[in-house]
Amino acid sequence: MTEVREYINAQGSSPFAKWFNGLNATAAARITMALTRVELGNLSDHKSVGAGVWELRLDFGPGYRVYFGKDGDRLVILLGGGTKKRRQKNIETAKLLWKDYKKRKREEK
């Protein structure tokens, strides 16, 4: 099993939740199903976009994407989401969030 968690920024909010909560019910349900598969270890259609950030590609609607980082073998940190149209901006944001996650994790030790 893989644990899936949301990245929480220094202000205590989740960029992934902000994006997810704005989705329509059908998109939210399909993304929830995809994340359930991730928890079961099935990342299906995903690829690295650099700097430790991965993109889970969902082939429906406008081409939804979920951005995440892998913290070890069994922990996935959800950084955000978007559509194919805003892909490059979303990737840049996810990379910044991942960098912050790693920095804050180092500081906790």
Image: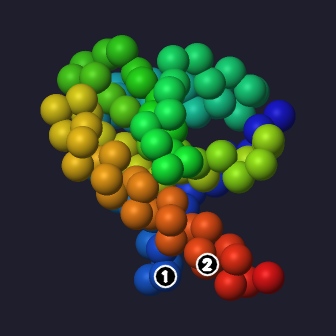
Read off the residue under disc 2: 104
User: Which residue is rendered at x = 31% and y = 53% of the image?
Assistant: 92
**Relative side of 58 to 86, left or right:** right
Q: Residue at x 65, y 30 (%)?
A: 38
| Visible residue check, residue 8 | no
The amino acid type, in three-letter code, at marker 1 is Ala
- Vertical order, 18 against 69 (above or below): below
Q: CA distance from mark 2 to mark 1?
A: 9 Å
Describe the element under mark 1 as helix, strand or loop: loop
- Residue 65, image x, y percentages: 37, 33
Mark 2 in CB contact with mark 1 (< 8 angstroms):
yes
Left/right placement of residue 59 relative to residue 106 reads left
Which color scheme is applied?
rainbow
Q: Residue at x 34, y 46 (%)?
A: 91
- Nearest-to-viewer mark from 2 and 1: 2
Label 2 packing within 10 angstroms: few (<14), some (14-19), many (20+)? few
Where does the image place residue 62, in percent across and percent down from the top left? Answer: 21, 23
Type of amino acid under label 2 = Arg
Q: Residue at x 59, y 75 (%)?
A: 103
Is 38 on the left or on the right of 45, as rendered? Answer: right
Q: Is residue 49 above or below residue 52?
A: above
Comparing 64 with 51, the one in front is 51
Residue 108, visible in the rendered structure: yes
Given residues 104 and 51, the one toward you in this image is: 51
| Residue 16 drawn at (x, y percent) | 43, 54
The local secondary structure at tag 2 comes to: helix
Q: Residues within 10 Å of mark 1 (few under 14, many from 20)?
A: few
Q: Which residue is mark 1?
A: 10
Q: Image quadrant of residue 6? A: bottom right
The image shows residue 59, relative to residue 98, as above or below, that is: above
- Quarter of the rendering occupied by the C terminus: bottom right
